[in-house]
Amino acid sequence: MTDHTLSEATRARLKKVSTASIATALYKRGLRNQFIQGVAPVAPKDENMVGPAFTLRYIPAREDRNPITVFRNADHPQRVAVETCPQGHVLVMDARQDARAATAGSILVTRLAKRGAAGIVSDGGFRDAHGIGQLAMPAYYACSSAPTNLTLHEALDINVPISCGGAPVFPGDILVGDRDGVMVVPAYLADEIAEECTGMETFEDFVLEEVENCAQIIGLYPCTTEENQKKFDAWRQKTGR
């Protein structure tokens, strides 16, 4: 696990920036595969999901190892992950992008929320998705899926490097989720990404205002003219941003 700690100041900044801005900032640093493909919010939330990754890896289920009775085991990894995910972290599940069976349901996700987790992400399915969507805690999944995870998945490893939606996720990486999806930010970059994206979005708010007033894009986005730079400087002074 990384030793980089997510500060409350950086967490607060990341709650206000878009995954699109983060994707661009990471692309500038040569990181092109940090978006978790194929997941969406179970229900949109007004605030971004932000937290360090705590991971759970599923492998394909083998029938002789996954009868319904395995849930009686106190050391079942799915249950242990829910009960040990640290407060403020995001539980991230690797289901090999196979949503034909659930990776969790509303009872487990509610327990995770009650324990103070920052969110949950799975590239597989959730059952009882309506109940999950009613929680205040953000949740991301591929789709609704009624079959129990044991049908196709065996929960095996906790807090190891995984793939989720084709993106590499290491324990401690910073997950940021908005209405578009989820980005994975290497922990050592979190502070500078938060700062850079805050500035990017200030400029983009100015650009959008200009476009809504019928300004042309060329020379504005990106800003390549002195005239537009002066307009932006004046806008920042006027808005206090």
Image (spheres, grey):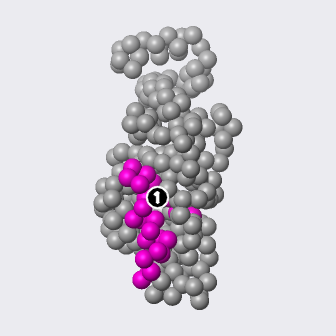
Q: Is residue 179 above or below residue 55?
A: above
Front position in the image: 20 or 217: 20
Q: What element carries label 1?
A: strand
Front position in the image: 47 or 221: 47
Q: In this view, does 176 lie above or below 164?
A: above
The boundaries of the magenta stretch are 71-94
- Residue 24 location, x and y as percent? 59, 36
- Residue 39 location, x and y as percent? 52, 59
Q: Name the residue under label 1.
A: 91
> In the rendered structure, does residue 87 fall within the stretch colored magenta?
yes
- Residue 240 location, x and y as percent? 35, 17
Residue 35 visible somewhere in the drawing: no
Q: How many labels does the image show?
A: 1
Q: Which residue is drawn at 34% across and 46% down?
A: 46
In the image as oriented, which residue stretches furthest toward the right? 30
Residue 241 visible somewhere in the drawing: yes
Q: Residue at x 50, y 10 (%)?
A: 230
Q: Residue at x 47, y 74 (%)?
A: 75
Task: Determine the image quadrant of residue 90.
Answer: bottom left
> In the rendered structure, does residue 2 fall within the stretch colored magenta?
no
Front position in the image: 106 or 220: 106
User: In the rendered image, which quarter contains the C terminus?
Assistant: top left
Give the class, few, some or many, for how many residues have Cα within 10 Å of label 1's Cα (few <14, many ≥20): many
The reply, left or right, for residue 117 in relation to residue 52 is left
Q: Is residue 43 above or below residue 69?
A: above
Q: Is residue 34 above or below residue 196?
A: below
The reply, left or right, for residue 213 in relation to residue 30 is left
- Residue 40 location, x and y as percent? 48, 57
Amino acid carrying mark 1 in the image: Leu
Q: Which residue is drawn at 50% across and 52% down?
A: 53
